[in-house]
Image (tube, coloured by chain):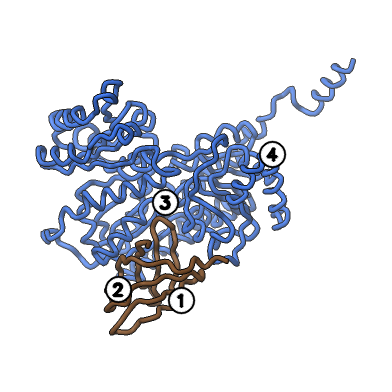
Amino acid sequence: MPNVMLKKNAEGKLVFYVPKKDLEEVAVSVEFDSPQQWGGEVVLGDGSKYYFDPQTPPKFPITLRAKRLDSGEE
Amino acid sequence: MTAMTREETEALIQEVLEVYPEQARKDRAKHLAVNDQSLEKSNKCITSNRKSLPGVMTIRGCAYAGSKGVVWGPIKDMIHISHGPVGCGQYSRAGRRNYYVGTTGVNTFGTMNFTSDFQEKDIVFGGDKKLAKIITEIEQLFPLNKGISVQSECPIGLIGDDIEAVSKKANKEIGKPVVPVRCEGFRGVSQSLGHHIANDAIRDWVLENRDGDESFPTTPYDVAVIGDYNIGGDAWASRTLLEEMGLRVVAQWSGDGTIAEMEKTPKVKLNLIHCYRSMNYIARHMEEKYNIPWIEYNFFGPTKIAESLRKIAALFDETIQAGAERVIERYKSEYDAVIAKYRPRLEGKRVMLYVGGLRPRHVIGAYEDLGMEVVGTGYEFGHNDDYDRTIKEMGNATLIYDDVTGYEFEEFVKKVKPDLIGSGIKEKYIFQKMGVPFRQMHSWDYSGPYHGYDGFAIFARDMDMTINNPCWKQIKAPWKTAANEQAAVAASAA
């Protein structure tokens, strides 16, 4: 359950950062990303998957707890 | 020697690894790589920020070095107590040449050493009382200090002293910030964790001091220079450029910096990060808490300076953008003259670097401006994200080494035969004795500044006077000339 720092980059894409892991990746897809609901499964550029509880869209940048679903390694 | 191919470089790494026992070889192999610009992420080719192997010669520092030496130490109007035995503070005192203005011992304390000088009885009975006493004494002797930080050395964590409680109490008594920093040397694998701990201490004990206080008048052009330690005057050379283009530099972190500047940083519009490795944490925190964006910039060499100035200006309005162009134009004749003078003397020379922080990637541009080529680079304590940023800066098939050992570095140099090595004091004399020109790139070999346009002129002169120094031709002992050696062989045979 890592704490993830989330922010939007200049292109408006979601950037993922986990401090202790030095993981800095752009999210490829976010399951729920509408004005009503945000969260669910998030897939990163390196293939790893994280899960956020669906919630009302937060104000980025923000630190949220995520569940790691798949490290993206074979 | 012409550039090495990918296969040659890979073969070189294998050859160097051969002498290690199997376990060590497997481990070290992960830290040595051949650069491949097509990669997006460094974790495909190199592992970093891991514990050094026992038995190899690493040149890393400790968490205390990262906190006291790098992040906190340069804050000039605070007194930084090296809490623990005397050695850690004394042997690292003033070694980084973080320049500052002020009267040392009166209102600034940068080059002084304050320590609690632990003795056996402090280890046995605890040092909290001593710490409280020291803070009172400091307050009496140096009343113009603006705050105190307690930099823990190893024993503090081992004996479990409660420096936080002492600090809180002292803070009430003296009415100034007293910051406990848990940067015991044994924490983490290198000084890198010390930077992080120091950043966290700033976040928890300093940054929010002026929250809700709007008395500081702000402008739309306020910026903070973060991660410039003013080595040899670097931050000053950077600051003038930013101010000339119309920005207002509110704070310098932490070279020639003060605690008041740090407390005002949450009021700025943009954080400029030079040393990403040691201060990205606080920038990310400020982005989240105060909504201050941050960008990385690079003030080594005219190409990168122009690039960075434009990048910074793009985040402001037209007046600043015009200001950036004006600055670049104003210094053009100066840096063109520097390049015209030194490039013919340095063209085609090959450089190997092994330093810490931001320099393994940031100085590449400055060398390229002089027509030189960086053929190998590595970080003492870099993380993945540093290498991510390095891959694109380095040429294809060049060597990349993480936490390189003394042996590996020597072997690489013997095979790659660079014309210049830029690394630290521990490597300096080995390579000079091998007859390879060397610059100590941690504190610019007691020269500097190297940042900014002013710094570039000094950088170019220093590289020239090192590489083209006639002493390198005299380095071979007179009795080791070819003729003498043959005579010696003949004599021993007779």
Residue hosting label 3 = B451
Q: Is residue B405 left or right of residue B330?
A: right
Q: Residues within 10 Å of mark 4 (few under 14, many from 20)?
A: few
Q: Do the residues labelled 3 and 4 touch (CB within 8 Å)?
A: no
Return the x and y of residue B283 as percentages of the image width and height: 32, 59
As drawn, B61 above or below B220: above
Q: Residue at x 47, y 53 (%)?
A: B383
Q: In the picture shown, does residue B443 fall above or below A60?
A: above
- Which residue corresponds to mark 1? A28
Q: Quick one: quadrant of the C terminus of chain B?
A: top right
Disc 4 residue type? Val
Please state the chain letter of the residue tagged with numbered disc 3 in the rendered image.
Answer: B
In the visual, does A67 lie left or right of B34?
A: left
Residue beneath disc 2 = B317
- Provide residue A37's location: percent of width, then percent of height: 30, 82
Q: Is residue A50 above or below residue B9?
A: below
Camera-side mark, 3 or 4: 4
User: Are discs 3 and 4 both within one chain?
Assistant: yes
Measure the C-alpha gap from mark 3 to mark 1: 37 Å
- Residue type of the residue flagged with mark 2: Asp
Which residue corresponds to mark 4? B19
